[in-house]
Each structure stands twice: as structure tokens, then as C-alpha cells.
Amino acid sequence: MPDALPPDGLLAELLALLGPAGVLTDPADIAPALSDWRSLYQGKAMAVLRPGSTEQVAACVKACAAAGIPIVPQGGNTSMVGGATPSEDGRSVVLSLARMNRIRALDPVDMTMTAEAGVVVKTAQDAAAEANCLFPLSFGGEGTATVGGVLSTNAGGNTTVRYGNARELMLGLEVVLPDGQIWNGLRRLRKDNTGYALRHLFVGAEGTLGIVTAATLRLFARPRANEVLFCSVRDEDAALNVFRRFREADETAIRAFEYMSGVGVDFAVKHIPGVTLPVADRADHYILVDLASTRADADLQGLAEQVLGAAMEEGEVLDAVIGGNEAKRQAIWRIREEHPEAQRKEGASVKNDVSVPVSKVPELIRRASAACVALIPGTRPVPFGHMGDGNIHMNLEQPVDMDGAEFLARSHDIMDTVNEVVRELDGSFSAEHGIGRLKTDMMEAWRGGAELDAMQRIKAALDPAGIMNPGKVLP
């Protein structure tokens, strides 16, 4: 049993409510829930609660609220910023939504799916596909991340340029409030203008205002044609110009537009078995373009050849490969998706999830890279990500001759250096990963004044005791 036990009677009450499988207290059983995906934080907790229904979630919240016990909601525990990790004081409980994993309804006419918070994103994608529909949210952690988690962090991903992020894909929510009330807002309506849009409060709130237990999500028609391109380009400006060319030729065909640096691709080829460079010669800059259409007769290859031909004539594209079949398309995407793992294998890295106006992406990459190298000579910039929506993961890999721990000790210096450039370009220091524990100290400088005051008032109104995921989002 953990050293710090809940107040008298609470553990027995929760055990009676959830059964032995619903209350974990053995250190070996709860250990996986106490560390974040990046191993930045190692927390403690009295117990891990695993309710199986919304009513059980509500009962757990009421019991913990009465005892003054903080609650840390947790989905797939894939947070990049420690958003689902408990503090080190051991006073809180982790409330896992893993057992709430049912798809309650799927309507291919309304084009909606109602899924519980513990449904894994890949499971939601597969269920939609079985109904000949598309749930388009897609990112590297989709095999582990859950519906509740991606809504609580307003996750973006690879297809945001076409379908929007999690907020745009959500029509309604079911939420357990901090006092244990259940708000059933699972509406399938595209138009519902009846007072405050409460559902939007909880998307991106990282569990600090309540616990998302289910959501009604938008579905789309499945693409019937798809093509993926891998191109080496002259520089960052050329990459953006190619995006503009595709947008002008057929904006509706762009499903993803990703930038990768030469260093990042080098790491993927070096560290990930089976990953190879698709083009003949190494370059300093690459793009991945994913085209898709719901028309079976869409000539995406012809569109690609038309745009790339013009870009090659202008010297923007140096070389290009068109996937041509599903295996090759997946191989191209794997280069991009394996960037985080390749960086991990290369050594210590500091991650910056930032966004700027799309037109400013080339300047962001150049200026932030130069500033970080000036700060710590030998630092290897590894920018990559969603150029089409302005979200670049401005990551920095340790110098070859520097100790990893020493480099990570400069994390906040590096983040401040990147963020100084981001601020000057009218961007955001958090694009799609959220605030969590990692970035709360930045909120005052970036969102201080009336905006932060309004957030704190909302938090105080809904959670006056401060039991919902304390220490996250707000300073």
C-alpha cells in the first residue's frame, strides 16, 4: 500500500463503489500511471481509480470532493507536457478513463459518432471506416491516445489543415463537473445557438474544469483517392511556396502538408529500421504532401505532377517521389511519424510545440534555429511538423559532445529563446500539446491581464475547491 492513504473511509467507499478492479493501490499496479510519456515527471498517488461508467465517475468525484482529495484525470497518458501526471506530494488520486471505452452510437447519415472518453483514437478511426466514414483526427500517438485526452488537450495532428483540430471535430460533450454533477451535452446538432457554448470550455482545459466522459464527434466521407509525395526542396521559403501552389491548384485536395529538416530525416534513416531516403540525394529541407479526394476519378497524380513540374522549373523542388501505392505511401509517412522516436534514440532533445501565422513559418525555422545554436553552440535544430497550419515542432537535439542531462538542464533557456522569436512573429508557445505542468510558468507572460484573469475566474467558479487536476494549465 502507498504511504499516504486517503482520509478514513474514502478508500473503502471507493472500493465498494468500483470493486477490486476499479481501485488500484499496489505500487506495481499504479506505477504506469505516475510517470509521463516523456519521463519528465514522476508523481505519486493514493490510488488509481478505474470507473466503468459516467455514473461511477460522478460518484468518485463526489466522494473525493467531500474528502478534499485532488483528482488527476488520465486517458492514454501520452501527454507531452505532463498534463496527466500527479504531483509528487501523493495527495491525489488518478482517475483513469480506460474502462470507459464503448462507442455508444454511430450514424452514417448524421455523420456522427458518440464515443466514451476511453476509446482509443485508432479504434474510433476503425469504427468509422467500418461504416464507410472517416474520423480524420490523426497523429503519431493515435494508437494509445484516447478521445477524452485529445479533446482535453484540443489535439491537432497531421490533417488539421483540412479538417481542423479536436475542437472543430466535436459537436457535443458529456462531462462530470467538479461537484459530481453530470452535464449531458451530447448533441448531434451542427447548429445550436442557445446561450454559452459550454462544450468549448472543456476542450483544451486538460481536465482542470471537469472530466470529459463521452463526446459526439463529426465524421466525414472517406477519401476514395489518395496520393502521398516526398520532396526535397531548396529552402524553407520554397517549401511554403509549394504549399501555396497546391492550395491554388486545388485546396480541397490537401489533407496534410508537413515540413522536415534534413537533420530530422537523417536521424530517422539512422535510427529507425526500414526507413530509407526516398529521393536520390540528401537535402537540408523536405516536405511531405498528402492529397486525398472523395471522388474516385480524381487525378491526384496528375495534380501532383502539374504542381511539382512548375515548382521544379522555378528551382523550388529539387527532387520528388510520388508514392503510387499504399505500401510506398505508408513508407513515406513513416519517415515523418518516426521523428520523435529517432530523436529519442539520438540523445536528449528539448521540444517546442509552437505556432505562428503560416506565412511566418520559414522565418520561425530560420531565426529560432540560429538563436538556439548561438545560445548553445553545437545544438542541432530539428524543426518539423504541420507547415500547412503554422504549427512547427521546434525541437533541439543535444550537441554531440555535450552530456544529455547538462543539455536538458538548459531546457527553459532554450524554450525561452524559441519563444522570444515566436512572440515577435505573433505566434503561440503552445500549439497542440497543451500547457500541462511544463508550461504553466509561461502563462502570466503570454496570457496575463484580462485573459488570464477570466480563466482563473472560470476555474474558481466551476472548481472552487481546486481539486480538478491541480497544478496544470494555470499558474
Image (cartoon, rainbow, N blue to C red):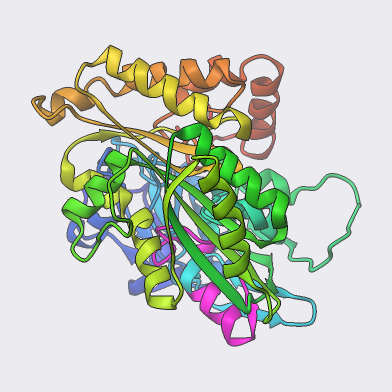
Is residue 141 inside the magenta stretch?
yes
What x and y, as percent, mark residue 374? 29, 12
What x and y, as percent, mark residue 380? 25, 29
Query: What segment is highlighted magenta in the picture?
Result: 123-147
Decide if residue 62 is in sight here: no
Q: Residue furthest front?
A: 313
Image height check: is 355 above or below 28?
Answer: above
Foreground pick, 218 / 373? 373
In the picture, residue 148 is in which quadrant?
Answer: bottom right
Residue shown at 56% from the left, 35% from the top: 465
Residue shown at 44% from the left, 63% from the top: 142
Residue shown at 64% from the left, 73% from the top: 299
Indicate the quadrant containing the N terminus: top left, top right, bottom left or bottom right.
bottom left
Image height check: is 213 above or below 411?
Answer: below
Number of marks: 0
What x and y, as percent, mark residue 26? 21, 60
Is residue 45 found left or right of 433 in the rendered image? left
Is residue 245 found left or right of 275 in the rendered image? right
Is residue 1 found left or right of 433 in the rendered image? left
Image height check: is 169 above or below 85?
Answer: below
Residue shown at 59% from the left, 39% from the top: 241
In the picture, residue 262 is in which quadrant?
Answer: top left
Decide if residue 249 is in sight here: yes
Image height check: is 411 above or below 6?
Answer: above
Is residue 140 inside the magenta stretch?
yes
